[in-house]
Image (cartoon, grey):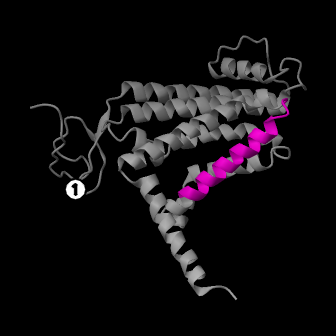
Amino acid sequence: MADPALATAHRRALPRLRVRLRELYHGSSPRAVRFRLSVIALDFVLIGFFVAAPFLREYPVYLAIDYFVAFVLAVDLAARALSHSSLRDWLRRPSVWVDIFVLVTLLFPLWLFNLGFLRVLRLWSLFHSDFFWETVGRRYDETRWEDVTKSVATLVTFVFVSTGFVYASFARNHPGIEGYLDALYFTLTALTTTGFGDITLPGAWGKLLTIVIMVSGITLFVRLAQTLIRPYKVRFTCPTCGLMRHDVDAVHCKACGQLLNIPNDES
C-alpha cells in the first residue's frame, strides 16, 4: 500500500517545480536572465549541429550526438511546458510545433532522414520567440534590431531549408548535384537570380522548385530592405488601447488618440 505522506509529497513537488521553472523562464531576476541566456546559447549550439548535420552523417558518432541533442531538446520542451501557466495556450504557438517536429526528426533519424533538413527551422522559431526577445532585447525599446534580426533569420532559414529540399530531391540522382555544397551553391544562385546555368534542376519538379526559390528569395530580400529603410518605432504600451509600437516622436496614440508620455534622452 502506498504511503500517504509520500504521495502528498509528490503532489506538492510538481507545483513547486512549476513555480521554480516559471521564475527561471519568465522572471526578471539576474538569476533568471542568466539562466535564459544559457538556454539561448545552448540553442545556438543545437542550431549549429543542425546546419552541420549533412556533413556529419557519415561518421559513426553522428547517431549518438543526434540522440543526445534529442534528449536536451525534450528536456527543454518539457520545462517550457511546465513553466507556462496554460498548456493549451502554449501549444497554440507555431514555434512550439516547429520544436516538436524537430524533436521527432531527432528521435527517428533513420526513418525521417529526408526530412532532417527541416530541423534548421529551429533557427526561425528561436528568433521569433518572445523568450529570445524578452531576454536579449529587454534593454532596447526600439524595434529596428528586432525586425532586422527576424528578417535575416527568416532569410537564412529559407536558404538552408531550400538547400535541404534540393539535396534530398536531386543529390546523387542528378549529375550537377553530388553533395550538400552543390545544393547550397545552386540555392544561392537561384535565390539571388544570378543563374550561372552550370547547375540546373531537371524535370517539372526541378523547374517548379527553382521558381519557388527565386520568387521567395526576391520577397525575402525586399522584406529585409524594408526593415532596414523604414523608420523604426519604440516600445511603449498605450494605457488605453494597449498599442505597443509608436513613432519615436509620437505625442498621441495613433489608434485611440490617448496622450502618451514616452521616455527619451532629450531634456
Report the quarter where the N terminus lies.
bottom right
Residue placed farthest to the left in the image? 267
Note whether 2 is above or below 187 in the view shown.
below
* Residue 138: x %, y % from top left: 35, 41
Left or right of 254 on screen, residue 42: right
Amino acid identity at mark 1: Pro
At 64% from the left and 31% from the top, the residue drawn is: 48
Reply yes or no: does residue 76 show up in magenta: yes
Residue where numbered disc 1 is placed: 239
Q: Nearer the viewer, residue 220 or 157?
A: 157
Report the quarter where the C terminus lies.
top left
Left or right of 224 on screen, residue 145: left
Left or right of 24 on screen, residue 171: right
User: Where are the magenta residues, as a range?
Assistant: 58-80
Q: Nearer the viewer, residue 92 or 221?
A: 92
**Mainly helix, strand or loop, the magenta region?**
helix
Note whether 8 is above or below 217 in the view shown.
below
* Residue 52: x %, y % from top left: 71, 29
* Secondary element at image label 1: loop
Q: Nearer the viewer, residue 119 or 198?
A: 119
Note whether 141 is above or below 177 in the view shown.
below
Reply yes or no: does residue 154 show up in magenta: no
Residue placed farthest to the bottom in the image? 1
At 48% from the left and 58% from the top, the residue drawn is: 21
* Residue 182: x %, y % from top left: 78, 19
Where residue 63 sits, quadrant-wise, is: top right
At 19% from the left and 51% from the top, the residue drawn is: 257
**Visible residue check, residue 189:** yes
Left or right of 99 on screen, residue 177: right
